[in-house]
Structures are given as C-alpha cells and as structure tokens.
Amino acid sequence: MNRIAVLTGAGVSAESGLGTYRDNGGLWDNYDPMEVASAEGWARNPGKVLEFYNMQRRHLREVQPNQAHRLIAELEKKYRVDVITQNVDNLHERAGSTHVVHLHGEVTKVRPENSCNDFDGFSEKLVFDVGYDPVVLGDKAPNGAQLRPHIVFFGEAVPKMEQAIDLVSRADMVIIVGTSLSVYPAASLYRYARGEAPIWLIDPKPVSLHDPRIRQLQTVATEGMKELCEKL
Ligand code: APR
C-alpha cells in the first residue's frame, strides 16, 4: 500500500474545541447558513458574513490540532497521504500534513469579491492570507474590490472537486473522519475509491452507507485514528 486519501469533516476538529455544524448545539443551530455562508447571504449582508468568519478566525487562533490531526500527519512517514478536507480550519497543516486540499476554502484567506469563485480559475496572487485578523467592510483588495472570505459559499462551485476525485481514485485506502456526509459533492467522494481499496469510517455516530467496502470505527477521531494506526 502506498497512497492513503483521508476525507475529513468538522468532526476531526471537534476534540480541538471547534464546533461541528450539525451536531446538537452546532454552528447551524446558532447561525443560518443561508445568511452567513451563502452567495445570497453575501449579496444581502456582507458585513454579517464577514463577522461570522472573523468569529471563526478568532476561535481558530485559540485552539490547537488534536491527536487525530497529528496521527493523520504522521502517516506521511510511511505513506503518501492526501488530506481532502471540508474543513476551512488550518489544523491539518498545523499538525504537519503537507498535502491538504480544502474543498470548501480556508478561513485564514480572503480574495476580492469580484474574482471568479473558481479557486483554480485565477492566480493565487489574488488570494491573501490574513491569518487570524478580522476583515471588515471597506477592506479592499489591490484591485479596489471588497475583500471576501476565500470560502466556497453554498450556491457556489467546488473548484477542487476534480483534483479531489483524482486523488481518491488513486488511493490504496480511504479513511473518512468526522463528516456527516450530508453536503454534496464532497459527500460523494468516497465512491470514487477503487473497488479493492478498503474504506475506514471514523465517527461516534452510526453512519449507514450501503457500501460493503466501508468498515466503521464507531468512536471519536482521536480514538479511531489511534486504533486504525495500530492496524496499519
Ligand atoms: N470525532 C469524530 N467525529 C465526530 C466527532 C468526534 N469527536 N464529533 C462529531 N463527529 C461527527 C458527527 O457525528 C458528524 O457525523 O462529525 C460529523 C460532523 O458533521 P457536520 O457537522 O455535518 O460537519 P461536516 O460533515 O464537516 O459538514 C460538511 O457542511 O455546512 C457545510 O461547509 C460546511 O464543510 C461543511 C459541510
């Protein structure tokens, strides 16, 4: 076995203290995604969207990667590991993962609001890393446009999906950690795994996927990754 694709969602960062979206008390219990994370929401009230991601950046500054992030990074000592995450946090990178694809963008980055929403459709020089600093109305890019979060809003294309499908289809094993698999197209990614590639799923909730290749470790990410790494 040479290549592992690790598909992660908010659950992998839960033990770091970052909220998930759909668990009880999750982000979408407290915020309407259509107001703070959609193209229409940005058009209607960009200030509200900017504050939502400013809050996420403030929180991200205070937390650290957890043992699950670190064990995923350590797999790179033995395998080629591609992390394909729906998360917009930077905890995989801070834990040491070196091949991370952010399907839904990155909360520490911004770009001019008039740039196309195809991340690959324009040069990276239009993407700025603001770290954990806030961005407010009136903060402009060099081209004079309002800066917006470098996030894939609901209603926008997922430009890195093709790259993600290629990486999953080349993997000898797929590990799914901490995602409710409720948002497409990200949720369909595991289906591109080769027929003979085992698929491990780590989640404390039972996930009913009718795919005989999937074996679930019904536990939290840190425990599940520890158990899985002992098997590898
Ligand atoms: N360890 C592992 N999994 C966990 C843990 C934990 N400690 N705690 C919760 N989970 C699981 C939950 O059981 C659930 O299956 O993590 C999953 C979190 O699901 P969601 O909150 O829906 O998060 P996610 O799947 O990442 O959401 C996908 O939805 O709103 C959009 O863009 C947003 O990227 C996000 C996408």
Image: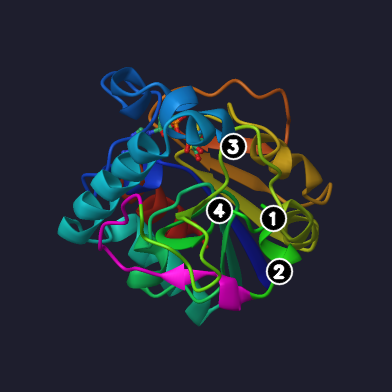
Give the residue number, with chain letter if any, for mark 4. 113
Question: Which of marks 4 and 3 precedes in the sequence?
Answer: 4
Asked whether disc 2 touches disc 1, contact meaning CB atoms under 8 Å apart, the reply is: yes
Residue 101 in the image, given as x and y percentages of width and height: 59, 62
Residue 74 in the image, given as x and y percentages of width and height: 42, 73
Q: Is the C-beta of the residue carrying label 1 under 8 Å from the nearest atom of ligand 1? A: no
Name which residue type carries label 3. Arg
Asked whether disc 3 touches disc 4, contact meaning CB atoms under 8 Å apart, the reply is: no
- 106 vs 207, nearest the viewer: 106
Label for residue 215? 3
Asked whether disc 2 touches disc 3, contact meaning CB atoms under 8 Å apart, the reply is: no
Asked whether disc 1 touches disc 4, contact meaning CB atoms under 8 Å apart, the reply is: no
Label for residue 116? 1
Q: Residue at x 69, y 69 (%)?
A: 1
Give the residue number, with chain letter if any, for mark 2. 122
Secondary structure under the numbered disc 4 in the rendered image: loop
Question: Which of marks 1 and 2 precedes in the sequence?
Answer: 1
| Left or right, residue 154 beside residue 88 | right
